[in-house]
Image (cartoon, rainbow, N blue to C red):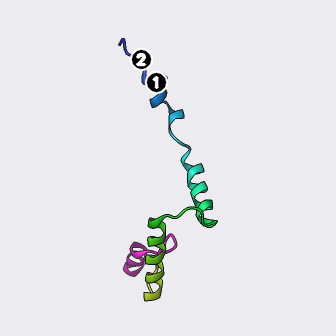
């Protein structure tokens, strides 16, 4: 009870953590302008392109995935 509450400690307060949506948008814009290189994003894009070349659906629209097709076949 004699310790300081967590909310008042500067390193544990919500102000300590970065604004993640802003950083996400910033990295997307820097990547668009060629100033930031993210290996994982490039890898995902290459894998998505390879899937579309093979004729697979990368991310189906909501309600048209595997489970929806299975449910539709049972009716």
Verify whether residue 38 appears in magenta: no
Return the residue nearer the eye: 69 or 44. Answer: 44
Q: Which residue carries the number 1 mark? A: 9
Look at the image and tell me in which quarter the N terminus lies: top left
Image position of 55 with respect to 46: above or below: below
Q: In the image as oriented, which residue stretches furthest toward the front?
A: 35
Tell me if label 2 and label 1 are in contact, CB under 8 Å: yes
Q: In the image as oriented, which residue stretches furthest toward the top?
A: 2
The region drawn magenta spans 58-75
Taking the spot 43% from the left edge, 77% from the top edge, the residue there is 47
Taking the spot 51% from the left edge, 69% from the top edge, the residue there is 62
Q: x and y percent of residue 3 in the render?
A: 37, 15
Task: Determine whether the residue tagged by mark 2 lies in a helix, strand or loop.
Answer: loop
Q: Residues within 10 Å of mark 2 (few under 14, many from 20)?
A: few
Verify whether residue 74 appears in magenta: yes
Q: Which mark is residue 58?
A: none
Residue 24 sits in quarter: bottom right
Q: Residues within 10 Å of mark 1 (few under 14, many from 20)?
A: few
Image position of 3 with respect to 15: above or below: above
Look at the image and tell me in which quarter the C terminus lies: bottom left
Taking the spot 50% from the left edge, 39% from the top edge, the residue there is 17
| Label 2 vs 1, first from the N-terminus | 2
Return the residue nearer the eye: 39 or 23. Answer: 39
Image position of 53 with respect to 41: above or below: below
Measured in 3D between alpha carbons, the distance from the residue under mark 2 to the one under mark 1, in whole angstroms, is 7 Å
Q: x and y percent of residue 5 in the render?
A: 43, 20
Q: Which residue carries the number 2 mark? A: 4
């Amino acid at each position: 009870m004699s310790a300081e509450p967590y909310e008042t400690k500067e390193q544990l307060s919500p102000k300590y953590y970065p604004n993640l949506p802003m950083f996400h948008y910033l990295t997307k814009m820097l990547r668009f302008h060629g100033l930031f290189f993210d290996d994982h994003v490039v890898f995902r894009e290459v894998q998505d392109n390879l899937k579309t070349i093979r004729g697979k659906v990368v991310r189906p629209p909501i309600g048209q995935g595997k489970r929806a097709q299975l449910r539709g076949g049972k009716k």
